[in-house]
Amino acid sequence: MKRIAVMLLLCLVFTTPCLAAPSTQQAVAEYGLENYEEALAMLADAGQTEGKTALNDYYTGLCRKQTGDLNGALQSFKDALLGKQPEKDAAVELIALLLNLEQLDEAQQWVAWAEKEKVKPNDIAYLKGLLLMKQKQYNEAITSFQAAKTGSPETDQQIEMQIAIAYAQSGKKKEAGESLKAIVTRYPGTDAAAFATEYDQRLSTAAPAKRWNLYAGVNYLYDDNVTLKSSVSGASTDTRNQRDSGITENLRFEYDQPLSGAWTTNLQYALQNNNYGRLHDYNMLVNSLTATLINRNDNGLLSIPVNLSHTALDYRNYSLQTAIKPTVTAVFSEHQLGQLSLGYNYRDMFQNTEGPGYDRTASIFNLQAGYIYLFKEGHGMLNLRGEGFYENTVGKEWRNWGGRLGSDLLIPILSGTKLILTAEAAWQDYRDNAAGRKDTTVTASATINQKLTGNLYLNLQYYYTRAMSNVDLYDYQRNVIMSGVELRF
């Protein structure tokens, strides 16, 4: 019996070290639990019992990196790659670490090795882009970053950020930014005073791998002068026939499609429907379709929007407009942009009960220049614009020329809260009008936009219009208040 006990004791003594010795796989499991110090000790023990392996060196490098021993990690990653059966994934970690330590020449050598061995092509392309950035080869870096894209928004978002940084460091920051994209793709069928609102909408849905955007909103409105009744002395004081409330709905869909070379295209469909509670003759439905060609180059961008817009008044044909407005956007610096556009718009009016002299069908020509200043990392914007135009109407009573000055200001106040202020002054000279009509119109608006959830926004808006004319019929004042919600996808 004693002899058996001694044999069992000897067996236990000699076998326990082998059973207790940790393996590399156990160390890997410990690393996965983020117990880096314990995993590092286990890897050292496993190296003595199992012999050095590429896998052991790889995870030793990972543990050393996590514990702050960067030089030790560097050597471990090299050991993992220099053996007969290298752990090729270590190349990604090694290159990233070499870049962090500014050892660019050696990083370049390992990038070449990894490309030859076809190690994680997307990851290596991304690291190569970072290397090229440090070497100030920005165009080559952008090409490499483009090759690193996977099609996943989660990964491509960081890549797009690096592309933007590359443009920034080469003096063309906004050429890459979604803010510039939002500015360029605005379409001519929209009132210029809505520019800041559209800019905010576009930024809120910006995503590098996303080609489409959708905006849908519904608002309650109160209008104190639906009929644009004259406000001059002696005019009718029957306010009941001027004031009304109602519901307005709007929808806009956008789709971006890259073309060959530096060209892309943006397609947009927009719908707006205004319904008044009593004054149904002023209900308005507008459908608009726009196609915009966009070309990027070293000096800025060229956009060529073509717009078709149909308006129905009380759901009866009112007008059909076709417009083209080539626009050049110049990038002066990372904060400053300039725009110059030349536009032509043909407006066909379907309702004319006053005779040929009052036919508002027209060819409209305009020249516009603008200055845009971006702040708050592109989420804030100041837009100053000036425009000259000529409306060559069929009826001479409406033929006019004039000018317009305006400004738009978008201010991020708090997280998810924006304030949008616009102001515009326009003057028109109706030279062929029998009464020698001359108008000056001032408009202003204030909008508070609050993000409620991921895609839901609250809008509070106030619009003011004051039209001053030497012809009493066209002299009026108007206030509109709107409140509603909008979905952005």
Image (tube, rainbow, N blue to C red):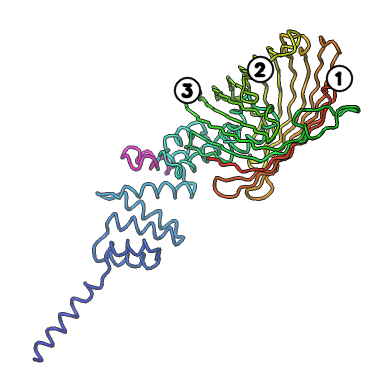
Residue at x-position 24% and y-position 66%: 49
Amino acid type of the residue tagged 2 in the rendering: Gly
Dot 2, crowdedness within 10 Å: few (<14), some or many (≥20)? Answer: some
Residue annotated with mark 1: 471
Which badge, 3 or 2, is on the more N-terminal residue? 3
Amino acid type of the residue tagged 1 in the rendering: Val
Start-end of magenta stretch: 107-122
Percent from the top left, x then y, of residue 46?
28, 65
Dot 1, crowdedness within 10 Å: few (<14), some or many (≥20)? Answer: some
Percent from the top left, x then y, of residue 114?
35, 41
Q: Does the magenta stretch include residue 143?
A: no
Secondary structure found at label 2: strand
Q: Is residue 157 above or below residue 37?
A: above
Residue at x-position 58% and y-position 22%: 303
Percent from the top left, x then y, of residue 274?
64, 32
Residue annotated with mark 3: 261
Give the CA separation, mark 2 to mark 1. 29 Å
Q: Does the magenta stretch include residue 119?
A: yes
